[in-house]
Image (cartoon, grey):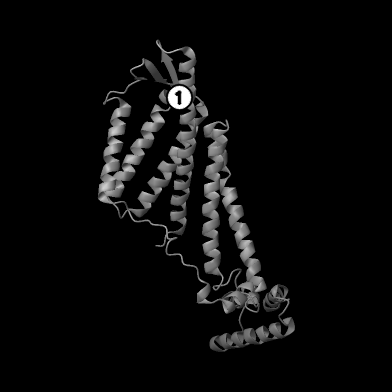
Amino acid sequence: MDLIDRYLTAIRWNLPRAANADDVIAELRDLIASRVEDHEESLGRPLDDKEISALLRDFGHPLVVAARYGTQQSLIGPDLFPFYWFSLKVVLALSVVLLIVSGAGDVLFGGHPVRAFAQAFGGAWWSLLGNAGLVTLIFAVIERTGWLTDHLNRWSPDQLPDLSDFTVKTKPKSAWEAVFEIAFGIGFILWWVGLVPLPIAWSNVQGLTLIPDPIWTAMWGPILALMLARLAFNLVQWLRPRWKAVRIGLNVATTAGAIVTLALIYRAGHWVTASSATLPAIKVAEIERSTNLGIHYAIIVIGVIWLFQCAKEIWIVAMARR
């Protein structure tokens, strides 16, 4: 079997079922023979095997040539691709949010913080890859069934929802807001590092003293690093508002870091100790219990708010128009 016969046989094996293989191969054989004759006429001699091989290589790989006779040239067509791309971004953004929530939940319920988030983000690639593959498979099936074509033929502008109030605002904060947050951040950092006197206890006129538990000392470094990163974010917002990618990246990173820090503080379960030389022990114990209960619920509320804020920033990253 010569090169041309082997080439045509390879094409026959890869032709779609809907194609008439005999007619296609006959047409291709005539076309190749015509090209061979043209080359031989220009050279004034028969082509050798190397020249025929080069001619067939220019004609195209058998898989590519056979695919031209199929009814579908792509897994997801151009009409469906915008819907596919939009859905893929939404699914991947939600997957990232769920990974963050899962890691935070493991920490809150007693898991080791570093190990919990290492496991969450270590499996993130497989999770994102699996979700992307599932979305692609669904849209490939939709492309095959032609459901979207029917939908596009029936759609009406009257069916479009009003999304004017749903638009995510990505406009930078005003200069005054940024300056206020910068001033607050600097003040907190100075107080936290002790340049502004840092009280180790709080007392009232009745001689009641509330002493912070060791968890606050253990979290001194992470809280300082978090506040410095947040200060950098506010400086970028104020001085370089057009650095959109940097702003969003710092915002997501600091919000996620705040959630992790809050989760570590929450795990302590006890945050202040009350003592008094004048009040009854039962009263002191009740004040201590009430204070820690208030801190307990405050941490939960703040954590939920920060989770939604982190989800919003990730949504902005996924959905922002460029």
- Above-or-below relation of 77 to 303: below
Q: Residue at x 56, y 41 (%)?
A: 102
Residue furthest toward the top? Answer: 277
Q: Secondary structure at mark 1?
A: helix
- Above-or-below relation of 53 to 215: below
In-image side of 243 versus 68 (left or right)? left
In-image side of 88 versus 257 (left or right)? right
> Residue 21 location in percent, x, y?
73, 81
Q: Residue at x 45, y 64 (%)?
A: 163
Q: Can you say which quadrant of the picture contains the N terminus?
A: bottom right
Q: Is residue 292 visible?
A: yes
Residue assigned mark 1: 215
Where on the picture, by quarter, is residue 273? top left
In-image side of 116 versus 231 (left or right)? right
Q: Residue at x 57, y 89 (%)?
A: 41
> Residue 250 location in percent, x, y?
38, 45
Q: Amino acid at mark 1?
A: Ile
- Above-or-below relation of 16 to 102: below
> Residue 108 location in percent, x, y?
54, 34
**Front-most of 220 and 268?**
268
